Amino acid sequence: MFQRKTVLSSLFLFCFNFLLLAQSGPLDKIDIDDLKRNLTFISSDELQGRKLGTEVDGLDICADFLAENAKRIGLKPAVENYFQPVNILGTKPQQNNFIEIQNRKGKSVFRTNSLVALNSSSESSEFETDKLVFVGFGDEITDDIEEKVVVLAQGNAESFLKDEFYRWDRRLEQNKIADISEKKPKAILIVANPNDKENKTYNQINTWFKRERFSLASEAPNNALSVVLTKADFADKLLGAKGSFKKYLTEVATGKKTELPDIRKTLKVKIEKQTNFFESKNVIGVVEGSDPILKNEYVVFMAHYDHLGVGKDGDVYNGADDNGSGTVALQEVAEAFMSLDKKPKRSIVFLWVTCEELGHFGSGFYCDNPVFPLEKTVAAINLDMVGRVYNGPQDDVWKDSPKKVKDFDGLYTLTNDVWPELANISAAKCKELGLVPDTSLPKNPFLRASDHYNFHKNGVPILNYATGYHADYHKVGDEVSKINFEKIKRVADLCFLVGLEVANKNHIEFLKEQNVKNEVGTDL
């Protein structure tokens, strides 16, 4: 019995070594010197942090660099010149926006510039009306509110009574706005909690929304419902006395009968926005499959190539790890596949996407306008930060995160449930390479945390590789000097082996349909 086990073990080792030898050729194409050379350029100050709209268009320079390398490697252009245009709209509120309350004689009794436009419409808005209705916290509306301005309080009765004025519950407010919007009001005015005497919540939201906000130009909502946040003094003026809004909310929250005064006032609102149009691009190349039928199915490798640009002090956020590491890793994986004498049965797509940091726009545009059918895409493998190794106590800034940066052998692997076999293939290839996969990341929020989400919500099997958050995440210290290129090579080797097996499987059957509900349409 012992002798038989020894023979079987020897046979296994022979087969394993044979497979490694057979694959060593393409894996040798994944070259550390190439990784260093490419990443040193991509993460240089010359590219100004690869953000949309910088004075020097480093994002476009990077796209050109990726396309040139795709051509050198021999990837087939999936679109003209490898570029899929992605048009982005930037919207920024102006300083002269206001809400004004006028009495029946048209005299102004209150005017404030303290308002935040919460919706993402690219258009300016101006209206005047005397049709106003208070709806408490906006959770139970029985009145007819069509074509009326609806005034409601932030939060709910429970948070109000507990004095949780500091907390902005994004999902709660989104849901209220969505429900109210279905009743076709003219506008929605959310009033900050009157218990918040220092206006901390309002100031926080105002800081978020006064910056330029971005959306896909093809999806930018026009003529959208105006949704505005303002301070409690506005509601007091509408109701006629200081503290009257708090008194009203207390009665609503405790279930007492509420009687509002007859509001004989007119509301005038002006919201002007500055809009800027930006042209960006995804870079897409393909290794065409060798099987006459299966070549019409696709394995997509993906990485975002943008980052955060330049800080107010002039420091450049070079983003060597985030996500220069994933960007250059895909170049080497592509070269490995192109080196194969016989290409895989399925086609391998290499997709470098733009504007992940602004809202996953590049991957979102691709999934809305797929170059290769999503229903024929058997896997989308996303690399986002794969170049760092735990570097001692400084990285413990993320000690409470489930995604703290791994040691040299560790790697986060995240999959959805569309095709469970994908996780098994990944785990087996990790074992071959001595990598230790960590599958513990909670799917909420990490399925939404990068570009793989847009494929996930379209029912595509996804696999995300990452080495984790380090002390320089989204900081100017994310420099090429701190990258572990041996780790990037190990991840790139893994991608090649996983992609090769997936692309050569004779039959793939998805076991689960995914029903992913999009979040309600607001920028909150």
Image (cartoon, grey):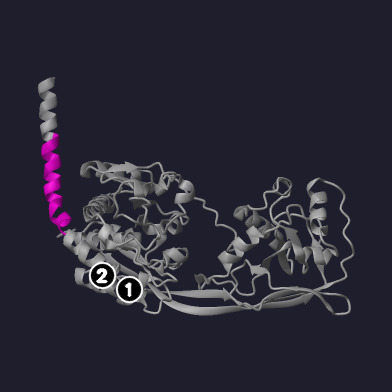
Residue at 27%, 41% in the rendered image: 428
What residue sits 34% from the left and 51% below the top? 465
Residue 193 locus on image (x, y percent): 71, 56
198 to the left or right of 135 = left
The residue depicted at 88 percent of the width and 70 percent of the height is 264
Q: Which residue is mark 2?
A: 41
Q: Quadrant of the C terminus?
A: bottom right
Q: Nearer the viewer, residue 321 or 79?
A: 321
| Quadrant of residue 270 within the rendered picture | bottom right
At numbered mark 1, what does the secondary structure look like: helix, strand or loop? helix
The image shows a total of numbered marks equal to 2
- Does residue 2 lie above or below 413 as drawn? above
Task: Using the image as rendered, state which of residue 387 and residue 289 is in the foreground.
Answer: 387
Q: Label 1 neighbourhood size at 10 Å, few (<14), some (14-19), many (20+)?
A: many
Looking at this view, is 129 or 50 the one in front?
Answer: 50
Magenta residues, start to end? 12-29
Q: Position of residue 363 (x, y in %)?
A: 42, 64
The x, y position of residue 186, in whole percent, is: 74, 70
Q: CA distance from mark 1 to mark 2?
A: 8 Å
Q: Position of residue 505 (x, y in %)?
A: 27, 49
Mark 1 / mark 2, whichever is N-terminal: 2
Amino acid type, callout 2: Phe
- The quadrant of the picture occupied by the N terminus is top left
Number of residues whose C-alpha sits closer than 10 Å to that of mark 2, classed few (under 14), some (14–19) or many (20 or more): some
Q: Do callouts 1 and 2 mark residues in contact (Cβ within 8 Å)?
A: yes
Q: Is residue 352 left or right of residue 277?
A: left
> Type of residue at label 1?
Leu
**Residue indicated by mark 1:** 47
Is 27 one of the magenta-colored residues?
yes
